[in-house]
Amino acid sequence: MAEFDYDLFVLGAGSGGTRASRVAAAHGARVAVAEEYRVGGTCVIRGCVPKKLLVYGAHFAEDLRDAAHFGWDVPSPCAFSWTRLRDNVLREVDRIEGAYTQTLNSKGVTILPQRAVVTGPNSVRLADGSEVTAERILVAVGAHPAIPECPGHEHGITSNEVFHLDALPRRILIAGGGYIANEFAGIFNEFGSQVILANRSNDILRGYDQQIRDRLLQISMTKGIDFKFNAAFRGIDKGADGCLTVHLANHDPVVVDQVLFATGRRPNTHGLGLESAGVELDELGAVKVDEDNRSTCPSIFAVGDVTNRIQLTPVAIREGQAFADSFYGNQPSRVDYGCVPSAVFSHPPLAGVGLTEAEARQQLGSVKVYSSDFRPMKNVLADRNERALYKMVCDGVTDRVVGIHMIGPDVPEILQAAAVAVKAGLTKADFDATVALHPSMAEELVLLK
Ligand code: NDP
């Protein structure tokens, strides 16, 4: 008789937990996964997937405005139904959740739709009170939106609620200047809301190349988004009419209909019982793990946002895969965190891989930067004065491309392919040796001066 109920017990059926569960089960392990909310996790249920679908919806606003230049007469103003888009998006989320559930079932993974907490190195307790044992436990519980402590914060919403709004807000203030803030600023602005983005610092999207961030700021302001910087959040008053008065440091109060907090995310470790098993957390509450995703308790592992390494779905998936292959597939593997590409689905989107110009100048002795600042063909005909910017950062001695940073239409699609070249260590000369694909925007990458 087996010593434990399962070989592997996974907490959380998000991107990392689902991948680890199904791969471990495919390798022959007896696996159970507990999920307190919905199979799919943040990315599928209230993150990347519904967000990207809203971004598609928002792009129609631009296309409809540009249509006349391409010969199409579209009634103006065009009617937009938020509730129709919202319901279609939520239906698609349901479909994907179903597909994830089916995959887990087909691999023989036991899904337990309830919260589980760790009670020891090899045991968990489920919400129904039952105790389950496992040889290994994988913590893949993700993270949650962090909200600044301030009076009236309960009147604001987060990315958890934003996909379910009953109506489009006429005026919305978005707190934060990172991924979620800039993506939703673009979405709501295209839908016709008046958007204010308020950040505590004097910049947006820390970590991305400065020139690319500056270009997004300039285009967003031209599109009508109002930015307030050095605007630490002080509080919200709700009036009898339902309007929200927002108090910000260094700025006059602003009155809006909705406040969206996009001020970072914190690991979901509170009350999870990890301390009882000797699992150490860092100062933000993230599970400390080694290169094999092992915590300070030898039988407990963690992957994804709960470890606060790189908070991106494809990274969590790789971590889950590496964990399952290493411990159940006899294929030891570790995630390579170098040159992870990322994108912000703002309007227009931006994307980057490798070192920014500032990082390269700090880390390498000599740096060469090539760039192209151009107006995409489609924008010219549409009379849209919106310029794209592509930058290639190279090691000045070896000519190796160490970073590519882009803003403009479809750049996440273009950067994914370019990231292969950066990861492979190709040089500027390799790019130059490739014949341009004309006419495209991507061809600028092999024509950089
Ligand atoms: P980000 O870390 O991108 O940005 C957080 C923003 O909030 C920063 O501008 C920061 O200011 C500000 N902030 C942080 N703490 C506070 C505070 N206490 N009070 C006021 N402002 C604060 O977080 P997001 O919430 O936008 O997204 C969370 C994570 O989710 C991202 O880091 C990303 O990894 C992931 N994500 C990825 C997406 C993608 O791949 N396209 C899309 C959405 C999310 P400061 O300027 O000082 O740093």
Image: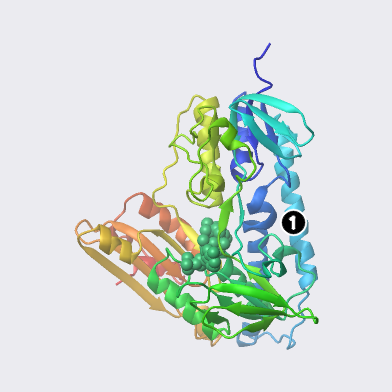
Foreground of the two, 255 or 358:
255
246 up-or-down from 94: above or below:
below
Residue 205 seen in this snapshot: no
Q: Is residue 56 left or right of residue 345?
A: right
User: Quadrant location of residue 108?
Assistant: top right
User: Quadrant location of residue 374?
Assistant: bottom left
Q: Residue furthest front?
A: 151
Foreground of the two, 60 or 303:
303
Image position, residue 170 (x, y; %): 72, 81
At 56% from the left edge and 46% from the top edge, which residue is drawn? 306
Q: Provide the residue designation for mark 1.
A: 92
Quarter of the image with the C terminus in it: bottom left
Type of the residue with mark 1: Glu
Image position, residue 142 (x, y; %): 60, 47
Residue 87 seen in this snapshot: yes
Foreground of the two, 414 or 261:
261
At 47% from the left edge and 62% from the top edge, which residue is drawn? 414
> What is the number of callouts on the image?
1
Q: Secondary structure at mark 1?
A: helix
